[in-house]
Amino acid sequence: PRSTSPPRHSKSASKGAQYILHRARMYDTIAAATADCDLSVAFTRWVKGRSNSYYDLAALTSHPVMQDLIREPVQSAGQQAAAGNASEAPTQRRRRVALVFGREELGMSDEEVDACQLVCSIPIGRLQESLSLSHAVSITLSTIYSQRLAHVTSTAAGGGDALPAVQQYVVRSAEGLAPGYDASEGTER
């Protein structure tokens, strides 16, 4: 049964990141949850016979919407620097990508996978049936973050020392998390 507040086991499992849980919203369907996204990607081991476009993780990060997302932080910082004042910088809606993972024990239903635009599978070989949810999410987010960091480094390297740009990107990434932490009043609930 659904409740208006997260259950105790969810709060316990999210130690150090409860502000994310605090901001989470519940939807009745995948389509409703991803309606305002530029791209929705279902992660599943079982991809044969699907009508959705299939990508492995390496190919997914090359998708045009993903490339926009990977390059976005650098472009936004460059636009602000060019304008000289953050309030004068052109405002542009950030790309939204829904990475949809299934439940730990059951994965995703066919209907849930079909509600997404793309299907992605993380290659794991034949000896293992599937990855745990935490491993699949970690591998995916780490891959995207590594690509973003590589882009920041290569962009900055063209102008000299890449270290300040990488440090600035990491700080901006942390600042992006701060509003969620502030909204939760910084408390572990």
Image (cartoon, helix red, strand yellow):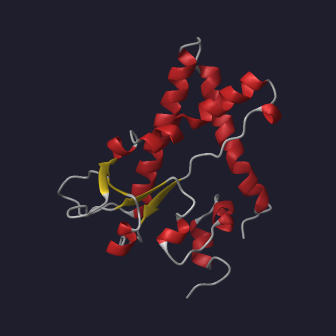
Q: Relative to 50, say whether 65 is above or below.
A: above
Residue displayed at 62% across by 45% down: 94
Determine whether, in the image, residue 62 is placed left or right of residue 176: left
- Image quarter (top left, top right, bottom left or bottom right) of the N terminus: bottom right
Residue displayed at 66% across by 26% down: 78
Give x and y (percent) for residue 9.
Answer: 57, 76
Considering depth in this image, is 138 or 179 the residue closer to the camera?
Answer: 179
Give x and y (percent) for residue 185.
Answer: 80, 62
Q: Relative to 117, say whether 25 is above or below.
A: below
Residue displayed at 56% across by 68% down: 13
Considering depth in this image, is 32 or 2 the residue closer to the camera?
Answer: 32
Q: Note whether residue 109 is visible.
A: no
Q: Relative to 111, say whether 188 is above or below.
A: above
Give x and y (percent) for residue 135.
Answer: 40, 56
Considering depth in this image, is 55 or 123 the residue closer to the camera?
Answer: 55
- Image quarter (top left, top right, bottom left or bottom right) of the C terminus: bottom right
Could you say which quadrant of the image residue 43 lies in? bottom left
